[in-house]
Image: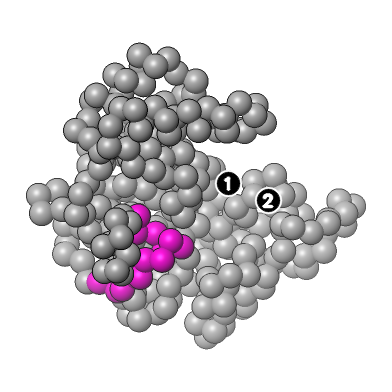
Amino acid sequence: MHRLAVATNAETFERMQAPLAARDIEVGHVETAERTLPLDESPFGEYDVGFVYPSRIMEGAVADAMLDVPWVNDREAILRSRNKADVLARLGLADVPVPETVVVSNPASEAELTAAFERFDPPVVVKPNSTTRGVGVAKAHDLDSFLGIVDYLDLVHDYRAVGDQSFLVQEYMADAADYRVMVVDGEYVGAVERRLPEASREQGRWKHNVHRGAEAEGRELPAELRELAEDAADELAIPYLGVDLLVTEDRAVVNETNARPTIDSATKYEDGFWDDLAALIRQTAEQ
């Protein structure tokens, strides 16, 4: 029996307990954030392995020191996936298809910003480099709108305590299907299509994040899309990864990745999903 430390108490924690217990892995919740934590003694108990490094890196480092366990996705993997520009640069240089993208290190001159905008056929997508769940992502149809969005980012970035002062300008792929593909230890294990309800699309909404009201339905992907997600995970060397694909009639690209992906209901994955995940956890524990 292995004991697995999980630093979240949301959907993933609830969904993994019974399937992993059936595979001799006991799942425990390790609370690392929004609490007080004396540093002279660990309150966490004994564990053999951790399930993805905590999302709050500073508090996570404390928990990491106290637990002293290997992680399925370690700190480096979390930071690599969180940096959207880093991911797209690594994948693009490895000939894994990605959207056309410009990274902006703020502040940049208006001339540079204008040149970046004019690389694209509008609209363009503007997104903070380090956020998740679609937070802060906007669409600009013309240069004035684009520069206005940048003005708001300037106000945020005026606070020098903001660690990441970069953002992306990216092509907008109209009518693209949005897939979250799960890869475990280099192998495809299932996918969902994220899609806004028809009523939301009629209102002009376009972001397909589940946390913004989109619905996730299990999908059986063709071999070329499975391989695309596996290629991305292999290039990034992240063993447990959600790979976001945008797919149109004539192309497919890796848009983002998530090294802390939520586990969906089991019906949306391949039959061997829990066996593969349990094997990865045991392999990590025995490193």
Regarding residue 77, the answer to whether it shows in the image is no
**Display colour scheme:** one colour
As drawn, the label of residue 60 is: 2
Label 1, on which residue?
75
Question: Residue drawn 37% across and 66% down?
Answer: 214
> Foreground residue, 284 or 14?
14
Tell me where residue 131 appears, x and y as whole percent: 50, 45
Mark closer to the chain start, 1 or 2: 2
Examine the rendered structure and indicate whether residue 15 appears above or below residue 102.
below
Tell me where residue 228 appears, x and y as whole percent: 24, 52
> Foreground residue, 110 or 107?
110
Which amino acid type is shown beneath numbered disc 2? Answer: Gly
Does 266 sit left or right of 255 as displayed? right
Marks 1/2: CA distance?
9 Å
Label 2 residue SS: helix
Question: Residue drawn 22% across and 30% down?
Answer: 120
Which amino acid type is shown beneath numbered disc 1? Answer: Arg
Tell me where residue 74 appears, x and y as whole percent: 56, 50
The answer to whether residue 229 is magenta is no
Examine the rendered structure and indicate whether residue 249 appears above or below residue 164.
below
As drawn, the label of residue 28 is: none
Residues at circles 1 and 2 in contact by the CB criterion of under 8 Å: yes
Question: Residue drawn 62% across and 75% down?
Answer: 27
Q: Which residues are magenta?
A: 207-219
Does 228 sit left or right of 236 as displayed? left
- For label 2, the crowd category at 10 Å Cα-Cα, with few meaning under 14, some 14 to 19 and many 20 or more, is some
Question: Residue drawn 30% across and 60% down?
Answer: 203
Q: Quadrant of residue 102?
A: top left
